[in-house]
Image (cartoon, helix red, strand yellow):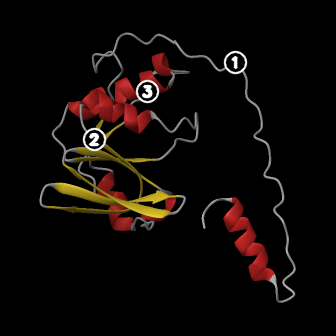
Amino acid sequence: MGADAAVVIDDEALRGAEALTTARVLAAAIARDQFDLVIAGTESTDGYSGIVPQQIAELLGMPALTYARKVTVADGAATIEQQSSGGYNEVTSQLPAVITVTAGAVEPRYPTFTGIMAAKSKPIDQPTAADLGVTDLSRSQTITSVQAVEGRQAGNIVTDDGEGHVHIVAVLEEAKVI
């Protein structure tokens, strides 16, 4: 919604391409135009590698700000709240940059009929990998196996009979937190 143009790369030569080849093709497409910010999801639904945006940033020679749950752009810089296991980190970088966003970073907007009709008149470029100058499409990575991750073990359940705090202190001491 609100885009002036689109680029769709649907090249049969890229079927089965690994993450690095995907990043090289996307970086070549991005580099054709001037930009301030490249915004990507944290992972794709095909390979789940989670590394393509970082590879794009490396190929374009710019910083990657990852796992953004909130993004602010002002005065030629981007600041994100980077989601972490303990909350979030605040990370700032000069533009241009690549940012990956988590699902909670955006609120979906739904197109209106007027917007759908306007989109039909927008230009859509459909280059191939060769058009972008990427001719080495070697398949250097292979998946040798896929295994399920072990499920988490159940934690300790403590019934608080008025002495639950004693157990909490003992666990914290064992973890050398206190």
Q: Earlier in the sequence, mark 3 or mark 1?
A: 3
Categorize mark 3 by other alpha carbons within 10 Å: few (<14), some (14-19), many (20+): some
Residue nearest the viewer, comparing 84 with 126:
84
The spot of residue 34 in percent (x, y) is: 15, 39
Q: CA distance from mark 2 to mark 1?
A: 32 Å
Query: Mark 2, mark 3: which one is toward the viewer?
Result: 2
Spatial CA span between label 3 and label 1: 19 Å
Q: Residue at x 52, y 63 (%)?
A: 86
Taking the spot 38% from the left edge, 10% from the top edge, the residue there is 136
**Tag 1 or tag 2, which sits nearer the N-term?**
2
Q: Three-letter amino acid code at disc 2? A: Pro
For label 3, the residue is 22
Q: Position of residue 8 (x, y in %)?
A: 37, 35
Q: Give the image location of residue 109, x and y in percent.
A: 42, 67
Point 84% across, 84% down: residue? 160
Please report the residue visible at 33 percent of the width from the left and 66 percent of the height from the top: 114
Quarter occupied by the N terminus:
bottom left
Q: Secondary structure at mark 1?
A: loop
Amino acid on which the number 3 mark rests in the picture: Thr
The residue indicated by pointer 2 is: 63
Picture disc at residue 144: 1
